[in-house]
C-alpha cells in the first residue's frame, strides 16, 4: 500500500511538471503595427526651445548666484580674482538657505559686504564678503561671529573686485 501511494504521488508530480500548449488568438504582428501611428515626428513642431541660463565657476561644478544688481553697467565694472569669503551657513534646504541669505544681507549691508548663495556638493552655502587677503577675511569672520554666526569660517573663492581702467 505504501508503494502504491508513493508511486501515485510520484506520477502526480511528474504529470504536473508538463508544460501547457501554446494557444493562438488569431492576432499577428502586423495587426499590432496597425494599431499605432508612428508617423509623428516631434522635430517638425515649431515650438519654443527652453533655455535655462546658469553661471558656472571655473571649476565647473559650482553654480553661484550673486545678489541682484539693479544696474547692468555696475556688473560690467567688476572682474573675478582669487580671494576669500566667509561661509556662515550650510544646509540641504534651498528655502532655508535663501532665508539666511536675506537675513545676512540685511545685517551686513551697512558694512558693505555682498552675500552669496552657492550650490556645491548637494549643499547650499551662504557666504559673505569679497576679501583679497586673509587678514581682511578674518575681520569679516569676526564681524559674522559678532552677529551670532558662531561657526563662520574662511573659504577660498573667486571674488568680485572693481575693474581698474
Image: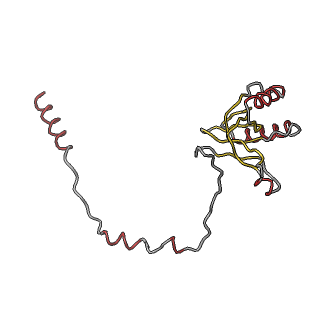
How many marks do you count on the picture?
0
Q: Is residue 83 left or right of residue 143?
A: left
Give the vertical position of 22 relative to 103 (above or below): below
The quarter holding residue 94 reads top right
Q: Position of residue 145 (x, y in %)?
A: 80, 26
Q: Position of residue 15 (x, y in %)?
A: 17, 44
Rendered residue at 62%/69% (across/down): 48
The quarter holding residue 144 reads top right
Q: Give whichever of 125, 156 is nearer the camera.
A: 156
Q: Is residue 92 left or right of residue 147?
A: left
**Residue that lies at the very extreme toward the front in this rendered image:** 165
Quadrant location of the N terminus in the rendered image: top left
Q: Give whichever of 138, 18 is nearer the camera.
A: 138
The quarter holding residue 120 reads top right
Rendered residue at 47%/73% (across/down): 40
Give the vertical position of 129 relative to 21 (above or below): above
Q: Position of residue 32 (x, y in %)?
A: 36, 69
Amino acid at each position: 500500500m505504501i508503494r502504491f501511494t508513493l508511486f501515485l504521488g510520484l506520477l502526480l508530480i511528474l504529470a504536473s511538471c508538463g508544460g501547457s500548449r501554446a494557444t493562438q488568438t488569431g492576432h499577428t504582428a502586423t495587426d499590432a503595427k496597425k494599431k499605432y501611428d508612428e508617423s509623428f515626428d516631434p522635430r517638425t513642431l515649431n515650438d519654443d526651445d527652453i533655455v535655462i541660463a546658469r553661471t558656472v565657476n571655473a571649476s565647473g561644478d559650482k553654480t553661484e548666484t550673486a545678489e541682484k544688481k539693479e544696474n547692468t553697467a555696475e556688473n560690467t565694472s567688476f572682474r573675478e580674482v582669487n580671494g576669500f569669503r566667509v561661509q556662515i551657513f550650510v544646509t540641504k534646504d534651498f528655502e532655508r538657505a535663501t532665508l539666511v541669505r536675506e537675513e545676512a544681507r540685511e545685517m551686513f549691508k551697512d558694512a558693505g559686504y555682498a552675500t552669496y548663495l552657492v550650490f556645491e556638493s548637494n549643499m547650499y552655502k551662504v557666504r559673505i564678503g569679497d576679501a583679497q587677503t586673509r587678514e581682511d577675511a578674518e575681520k569679516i569672520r569676526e564681524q559674522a561671529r559678532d552677529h551670532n554666526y558662531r561657526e563662520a569660517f574662511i573659504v577660498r573663492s573667486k571674488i568680485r573686485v572693481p575693474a581698474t581702467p
